[in-house]
Amino acid sequence: MTGKPSFFYTDEFLSYDFTGMHPLKPIRLKLTYDTMKVRKIVDDYDIVEPRPATDEELSQVHTLDYINAVKQADKGIPQFTYGLGTSDNPLFPGIYHSSSMYAGASICAAEHLAQKDMAVNISGGLHHAHSAQAAGFCIFNDPALAIATLLKSNEKIAYVDIDAHHGDGVQEIFYRSNRVLTISLHESGQFLFPGTGFPEEIGEGEGKGYSVNIPFYPYTAADVYIESFLEVVPPLIEAFRPDVLVCQLGVDTNTDDPLADFRLSIRGYLKVVELIKDLHPRRVVLGGGGYDLNVVPKAWSMAMAVLVGHTVDIPFESTYATSNTGREYAEAMVKEVKRLVFPFHGL
Ligand SMILES: [Zn+2]
């Protein structure tokens, strides 16, 4: 494998816009790309235009009825089924086309892994979409589509999701598979949408032991987060031996994020990204949540530098934000994961 990693970008990403007061602002993607240009991080990547996903590709994960409902909404025909047209997932003109573009970029990233060691779609990471249900600002589940694409030519895929919210849609879609190991670290569903993601959700049937959840207490900072990550994620990945790692790098764990309650600094987040980089040499990298427009472009542009091996010096923060808040809770959750899941992997 040679060449620079692929980074998918098009200004068409800006058209996935729920508009008004909706917290998901697509401008964050352009701001990230622009910051990468200013910091010359783009020099380390091949910038590639994505293509939209076809209906056939979408149907690997979504039902045809649901895809058709999104298409009808795209034409301006109101749809108030399948979670569409709600305050979280309001309808907007072009909703099918722009959602297909986000999904297509993740499929392209998965396809590029045939020639590359890494490919990135920062518009991706829409992990809440279900097979026939829009949820949590997500129309099509691009992480699941990337994984489905990779499964055609790889045996085993690991999915690591560091978004502040539980990666429920991805977990659900592969809940009965032992070829996909999903690991989600998130604020506890006791306190935050979507209300799931507890250690006892370990998969079903052949998939038992291949679904892993580490919930955290509100106000958990980087030190407790990183200790818990290290206790669980590297040993499981090492035991599972995936062919490719798909990672969702939502940055709504930031202390300034308006939608969640973590207390990670940008530096703390980047440390987690570095740990993810060290998990596996072959990676599909996706975006995710992140709702503070001052944080997302900084954090993601620097994450792109970290992922190609740069050490990032961050002048505006001198230390990790540290605190013991949530330590006991995190230790209890890690213990539960080890008890419930580790035996399936010989650990
Ligand atoms: Zn989120």
Image: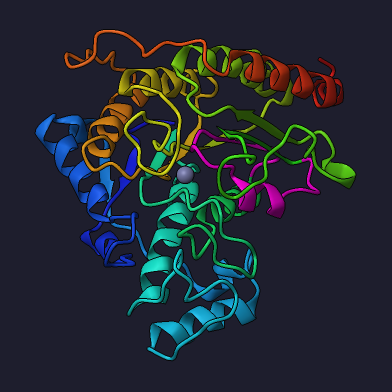
259 vs 186: above or below: below
In the rendered image, is residue 52 in sight?
no
Residue 263 located within the stretch drawn in magenta: no
17 or 2, which lies in front? 17
**Furthest residue toward bottom:** 77
Q: Is residue 102 above or below residue 174?
A: below
Would residue 316 appear left or right of 247 to someone viewing this image?
left
Residue at the location (80% across, 21% down)? 342
Residue 324 falls left or right of residue 130: left
Instruction: Relative to 179, say whether 62 is above or below.
Output: below
Q: Position of residue 159 (x, y in %)?
A: 60, 37
Range covered by the magenta-colored residues: 154-178
Q: Quadrant of residue 329?
A: top right
The residue at 79%/40% (across/down) is 178
Q: Position of residue 297 (x, y in %)?
A: 23, 38
Q: Residue at x 69, y 25 (%)?
A: 241
Q: Quadrant of the C terminus?
A: top right
> What colour scheme was applied to this rendering of the protein?
rainbow
